[in-house]
Image (cartoon, rainbow, N blue to C red):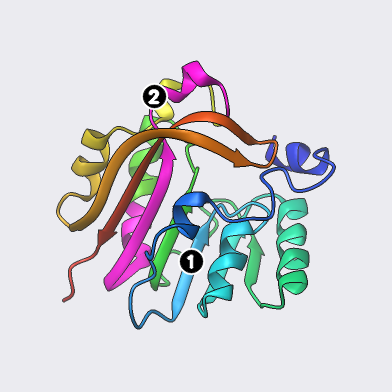
Amino acid sequence: MWEARYANAGGYLFGEEPAQMLAENPWVPDGADTCLCVADGEGRNGVWLAGQGLSVASFDLSPTAVERAQVLAAKSGVGINAYVSDWEGWDWSQSFDLVVAVFVQFMGPEARVRQFETLREAVRPGGRLVLHGYTPEQVEFGTGGPPYPENMYTPELLNDAFGDWRVLRLAAYEREVQEGRGHSGHSALIDLVAEKPAI
């Protein structure tokens, strides 16, 4: 489904600029060198983070999206290591200073348990997770994301999954989003920024 969606988009489906939440906030930890962008689509977030000086690895299951990510990186004068992979195919034994997951709500509640486990594994001790998505109210707005309220996040859900870490931000809010044709209009958003305890 995603490959067809990207292949038929006629351009960057979610635009070439990073998610507003990333660009507007200093979430890159001091001293961070490595970053993983999961399900990074056409690379808008990974490319922006590479521009902040990070060594970025990213993956997406769509070959068309990954090719566009590499083109965007070259256009922006940065390098990223972009791979074609689905979630289970990624090597989760690797760990990173920063793990960024933006609008990855394509999994239902059962699969999300493993999704969150792998995100936790990918953050090195003392590293940081940035998770940005939609709350259930987004389904009524219809301006992006899947039409399934059970796939969306609530503060309680994220606190249950990551509350044993140092939570730097956990906030649900509404704002206007203009990120390509894929995310356009008034949106119900949620952010989690959490730091994994150092060993």
Which residue is disc 2 drawn over? 136
Q: Judge whether residue 131 is colored magenta.
A: yes
- For image coordinates 77% across by 37% down, the residue present is 4
Quarter holding the N terminus? top right
**Residue 24 placement (x, y as % from top left):** 45, 57
The alpha-carbon separation of the residues under discs 2 and 1 comes to: 26 Å
**Residue 135 placement (x, y as % from top left):** 38, 30
- For image coordinates 25% across by 36% down, the residue present is 155
Q: Is residue 37 left or right of residue 189?
A: right
Mark 2 or 1, closer to the camera: 2
**Residue 122 placement (x, y as % from top left):** 38, 65
* Label 1: how many Cα within 10 Å (few below 14, some 14–19, many 20+): many
Asked whether the viewer can see residue 190, the reply is yes
Would you identify the image quadrant in which residue 196 lies?
A: bottom left
| Disc 1 element | strand
Which residue is disc 1 drawn over? 36
Q: Is residue 123 left or right of residue 177?
A: left
What are the residue bounds of the magenta stretch?
117-143
